[in-house]
Image (cartoon, coloured by chain):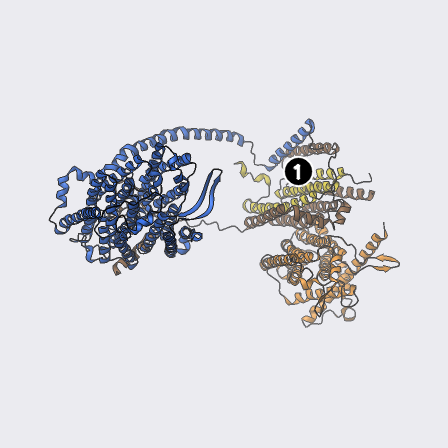
Chain colours: A brown, B orange, C yellow, D blue
Amino acid sequence: MAAEVLIFNLLSAVAIVSAVAMITMRNPVHSAIALVLTFVNVAAIFIMLRAEFLAAVQIIVYTGAVLVLILFVLMLVNPDDLPEFHSGKPMQNVFGFGVGLILLAEISVAILTRTVVAEPGPWNEEGVAAAGGNIQVIGQLLYSGYVLPIQATALVLLAATIGALFLGRPDEDQEPSPKRRTVATISLAHTRGADDDLIPALRAANIKREAGDRDLIMARDADEFTTSAEEEEKKGQSE
Amino acid sequence: MDANLLSSYIFAVIVLNVLLGLMAYMTYIERKVMAAMQDRIGPNRTGPVGLLQPIADGLKLLVKEDIIPKHADRRIFLLAPLLSFVLAPVAAAVIPFGDSITVFGHEVNLYVADINVAVLYFLAIGSMGVFGIILGGYASANRYSLLGGLRAAAQVISYEIILGLSLIGVIILSGSLSLVEIVNQQSETLTIGPLQLPNWFILSQPLAFIIFLIAAVAETNRAPFDLPEAETELIGGFHTEYSGFRFSFFFLAEYISMIVISLFAATIFLGGTDGPIQDGVWWLALKACIFLFFYIWLRTTVPRFRYDQLMGLAWKVLLPLVLINILLTGFIRLWGLGML
Amino acid sequence: MNELMPEQFMFLSAALFIIGMVGVLTRRNVLVIFMCVELMLASVNIAFVGFAWEFSQMTGQIFALFVIAIAAAEAVIGLGIIMALTRQRDTVDINEVRELRQ
Amino acid sequence: MSSWLFLIPLLPLAAAVINFILGRWFLQHASQWLATLAVAGSFILSIPVFLEIVSDEQAISQHLYTWIPAGDFDIPVTLFVDQLTATMLLVVTGVGLLVHIYSIGYMHGDPGIYRFFSYLPLFVFSMLMLVMANNFLVLFVFWEAVGLCSFLLIGFWYRRRSAASAAKKAFIVNRVGDFGFGIGILLIFVTYGTIEYAGVFDMVGDASQTTITVIALLLFTGAIGKSAQLPLFVWLPDAMEGPTPVSALIHAATMVTAGIFVLARAYPVVSQSADAMMVISIVGIATAFVAATIAVTQYDIKKVVAYSTVSQLGFMAFAIGTGAWIAAIFHLVTHAFFKGLLFLGAGSVIHGMHEEQDMRKMGGLKKYMPITYWTFLIGAAANAGIIPLAGFWSKDEIILGTWLYDHTVIMVIAFITAFFTSLYMFRAVFMTFHGEERFNPDEVHPHESPRIMTIPLIVLAVFAATIGFIGFPPEDGWFHHFLINAFPGLTLPDVAWSTIFIFAGISTLIALSGLFIQYMAYVKKSISPAGIAGLLGPLYKLAANRWYLDEIYDVLIVRPLVAFSMFLWRFVDAQVIDGTVNGVATLVTYTSQQWRKAQTGLIANYVFAIALGAIIIIGAFMIFGSNLFQ
């Protein structure tokens, strides 16, 4: 049916032209609009290729969410003075287009010289219709053979959500948090916490141990042993 | 070109024109109802009981000067209202207005298209609709407009999710994304003892219905969720710089969206054309009118939300609720209690 | 040319992909580069769906679905990074961001 | 009962795990009740097990799971209780319970109490598993586990450097013995093809005499380490750095007896080798004698008790060596009670004296802490062998055994050691509780310990006084008839009453003479201990300096090791290894610096490189042919 080919070609042409427009537009907002056009055409092509569900998802996700987000960010980052630069170095452009052309040529050759070896599967138009439609078939396949990938995708989306929340959170106050006290104190209170001979020496020297090769006994904070020892002493006296 | 396609085209034209006419009088009805609620009279000078007021308004907007701000992004500025206005009625294509009837010997379906992804189609078109507002807000080169656009973007994306998820429950129960199929299922009668109930999804999905209602109001940027245009804060928001018939495009697009989403809600939750006696399009109209009245009622009653409240409502209240609803529905379906 | 040929969507896919790639190569605005990446992903989806159509398979469509899901995640993170970047550096010029060089 | 057997070790394990995980943040002091209740549960469960063994005279076992199923090498974890194990169960859980109760009072207010009360039940668990194992490998695993618990508990106050190094010392010294023990188990497996007790004992005669001797000696090596025999006993006195209840539980009542337990358990193997038995006897009696002489010269109350423990362990060892198997176990049981009592009593004294351990700064404490005094006195008298307390019956029986099995030399030395035992025990009693008060009354206010500490003392004292009667009359008591069924082939010697009376008379005489001498020395002051010390001169110095064993180890082992380590550090590590590593790093840094220049930081360049790569790869495929595009 020639109309089908015609429509396909038309859609393809619009998609390609608007894609080219996207990378040539100076204003990124215009680029985004061109991309919307491309995506809508891609969705239409999906319908032609018997992928109605994907077409709807393409519109909802890409145009409805991703591009709206991109526009959102475009407006948010620099609303008054959106950068007008196009591309900096001419050499970059030349190289870019050159590489693109070579790759296109290569892929074209690959496409034109290909030979089909695969056998057609069961999901032609009649097969899909018999199974209840495109969505039904995708649903059945997804939740029978692809349960694990679905779960993994769900995890990826969750991680992305959390990541976005993290990236988008307001800047924390710039003042540094108060430094943690790192000064160690010496436990004098509880004899169990220190060398037996350490105690009188410590008392005499007030803080430092005199001669000797052994380290001081460090406590994490001054009260680590003090309270318990006092309690014990009180208890001892009362008895 | 076969006859079926032709009849679809013809029907589409009819629906479009009816929608446009309805939309014009929707503004009138809104003003009247609001007036009644606020103990006023409302428009009553133009024509009998002010019935010609919408036409007068339309003419006024058409002949007004079309102002384009100097620093505006001209092309987008011109494009944006069109986008809004064109996309708004497109979603109505999938709404079934009844079964097929025979006109002049031809079988004519009372819907433009019965596609198997109708619900998704509706959501897709709805998500596209916001582009008009965003681009309009951007192109105006006005801070207020830009803020309005930004708000619209965030709000619509958030409530789009709620809207879509609230429909999942219905989809689980019906097992189809086709609206015609969904309506057909709802026209069955449910007998519980002495009770004869219609199998409307509002009965099996009450929570989803309420959430859908809230999300629909937000999706159409209507009060109390009209933050993108909040007159008191943003002096009109995205359409501050628009005037004349470009403004009217935005204005009309909003009303068309309201009507379409009301039709959609009536179709999904209230059985569409199904009614106690003599099924037909009038039942759909009646149900849609209830929704429209609800819209107006809401606007006169509830004050506007603050922006953080709006977002908090979507993400912290409605999203968990709607997920719970999906979970429960899934379990119910799993245990074979699908038909309420 | 009465039938839709498989080569058509392949060329479309290739063309869109290469346009996206050239865009990434030549543009400096990080957001435009981002859009180009999205375009490349979409072009790959065309190929997937197209091959699924050609061989009457569903695997291609399912794969495309996963691509879309991952692309959504990528978009969210990418835009988050861009937001953080502009907040810190106040620029969207990709050539200004050269910390990796140090 | 056998189906509930697993609960006995499980309860302490559960308590240990819960206390360890939740103790710090949630339980804190509540952890002590959890641990005590768990051990009490084990104790209560052990009683019906014991009674069942008594009535049925049949070993019971419960298979839990197979730990290592590897072909022939099949290691089950099976709980196994026979007469020997049942006895040990009661001792371990009983003394363990009392120590737990005592610790509640002793450890009160310690910030690490949850740690203490997770290590302690963990130890009880390990010890229970050790005694309930039915094969040598599981035994070895929990042998190491009790070693670990010992390490943790000795080093409990790890902020005190001496405690930390004592813990290390105990652990390392034990490794020496464990090494031999492990090889012994390997040899058992190689020789007999199994390491389950029953299988090994059945086939014990199949191996050559030399092999059996080697196995027995290797097993004894383990016992030397764990049970603190000469020459590896040096760790035990140092282990007194741990909290006193730990000393009581681990280093007196239970863990140190693990070595004796292993010898007793492997008795069917050990007894096959006369040479090995001879070695065990000699080492045992030497240990007993050396430790007793050291104990007489010590001033630290805990050290005295510690050396006393070493000495008593020596008694047990040579009892097994001479063939008095039942006497050894009997002494193990009585020793567990009176030595636990002595340690807890010493702990009570230390507690009352505000952490003072030096007996020279005590004296006259009798009136301040009467309960502690009387219980300590009972313990000391039991240890010294005063009739009719527990120690008398078991020790007398060991010495009787030496005579019965014709070891006259050992018997003589044993009598001398018994005399020293009496000497040091009553020296400790009199120095601590009698005579003038040598502490500064302004600084120290001795007081009796709280009731939660004295009740275990009283309970232990009752046992220390009466437990000996389970072995009455000697060589023919109830205990003997109970244990005789543990192994087939054990016989009770037929002893005439006259012999028993003679030995009992000599023992009592010796014990009383020790008591008398010390009474004269420290209470009446009619003998000067310093004078005697001067009289003995170098001999006294030798004993007071612990026979210079630590110094010998220092010169022979520690210093060469340190020197070698220094060489490894200064030259091998610092120069060779670090030099290599740094050299490689420098090389990599330099190369990276050069490559860095390729990293422009421009995304476009990177993408360009990717695209070029794609072109090259696709081009290569197309030129050289591939089925990728076909």
Q: Residues within 10 Å of mark 1 (few under 14, many from 20)?
A: many
> Quick check: D1 left or right of B323?
left
- Residue B236 or residue B12, whichever sits in front: B12
Q: How many marks?
A: 1
| Figure quadrant of the N terminus of chain D | bottom left
- Residue B41 or residue D137, whichever sits in front: D137
Relative height, residue B241 to residue A18 (above, below): below
> Quick check: D22 left or right of D536?
right
Q: Is residue C32 visible?
A: yes
Across and down, in percent, residue B257 comes to 72, 58
Across and down, in percent, residue C23 comes to 66, 39
Across and down, in percent, residue D529 comes to 14, 45
> Quick check: D545 left or right of D592?
left
> Quick check: B220 left or right of D515?
right
- Residue D433 or residue B184, whichever sits in front: D433
> Judging from the image, what secondary structure is the residue with disc 1 in?
helix
Across and down, in percent, residue D383 comes to 24, 49
Q: Is residue A205 visible?
A: no
Relative height, residue D492 to residue B221 (above, below): above
| Figure quadrant of the C terminus of chain D | top right
Question: What residue type is disc 1 on?
Answer: Met
Residue at the limit of the structure toward the top, as seen here: D624
Relative height, residue D4 to residue C25 (above, below): below
Question: Which residue in the structure is indicated by mark 1?
Answer: C21
Q: Which chain does tag 1 point to?
A: C
